[in-house]
Image: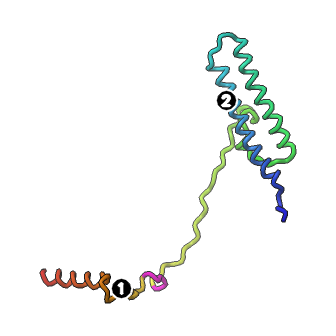
Amino acid sequence: MTSPTPPSAIESKYQLKTLHADIDLFDRRLAHLLKYEVFATEAARAAAARKITLKRDALVITAKRLAAEGVEYKESELPRSFRPEGVPAPVEVKLPEPEPAAAPHNPLENRSTRRQGSPYAGTSLDWEKSVQHYMQNKAAKA
């Protein structure tokens, strides 16, 4: 039995989404390293930045290859570094689905409103009998 979409396409779609998330993470790590991390020398800072950049570049090459192969992706999932400068991230807005119009309520159609006999009638578990007895005694005392 064959599926309409090959499993490799599905895996690639989610793999590309993960790659975009990882690239965005490396972008943030690199920005943090360059702005906030304290190093003994500028050479140590450059070495750390180069190490992160090399890892990021490998992910970028793979992500661009998958995109060139036609793997689907959403614009909102692109890393910030892949977007043109000054363009905010697209926001997906989900509109609430309108509720279908309900038919008017007819109590005769509701089975739970019909009076049904208790299966415990006449036994020690017949609560209706005890409630009826209580109500009679309460009315008599008043």
User: Label 1: which residue?
Assistant: 120
Q: Residue at x 31, y 84 (%)?
A: 126
The image quadrant that residue 131 belongs to is bottom left
Chain part drawn in magenta = 108-112
**Which residue is at the far right?**
69
Q: Amino acid at mark 1?
A: Tyr
State the quadrant of the C terminus: bottom left
Place of residue 89 in the rendered image (x, y in percent of width and height, measured from the top left): 68, 40
In screen coordinates, is 122 left or right of 17? left
Q: Residue sitting at 76 percent across and 44 percent down?
A: 15
- Disc 1 is placed on an element classified as loop
Task: Indicate left or right for 134 with 72 as reference.
Answer: left
Please name the residue shown 50% across and 78% down the image. 104
Identify which amino acid the numbered label 2 is placed on. Answer: Arg
Circle 2 — which element?
helix
Q: Residue furthest left?
A: 141
Tag 1: Cα neighbours inside 10 Å, few (<14), some, or many (≥20)? few
Instruction: Give the residue at the far front of this rendering.
Output: 124
Residue at (76%, 29%) from the top-left corner?
A: 55
The overriding secondary structure of the stretch rendered in magenta is: loop
Residue 34: x and y in percent read 67, 20
Q: Does the magenta portion include 138?
A: no
Magenta stretch holds residue 109 = yes
Mark 2: few/some/many CA within 10 Å (<14, 14-19, 20+): some
Quarter of the rendering containing residue 113: bottom left
Residue named by callout 2: 28
Is residue 3 depicted above or below 90 in this figure?
A: below
For residue 38, side relative to residue 16 (left or right)? left
Count of picture labels:
2
The tag earlier along the polypeptide, 2 or 1, is: 2
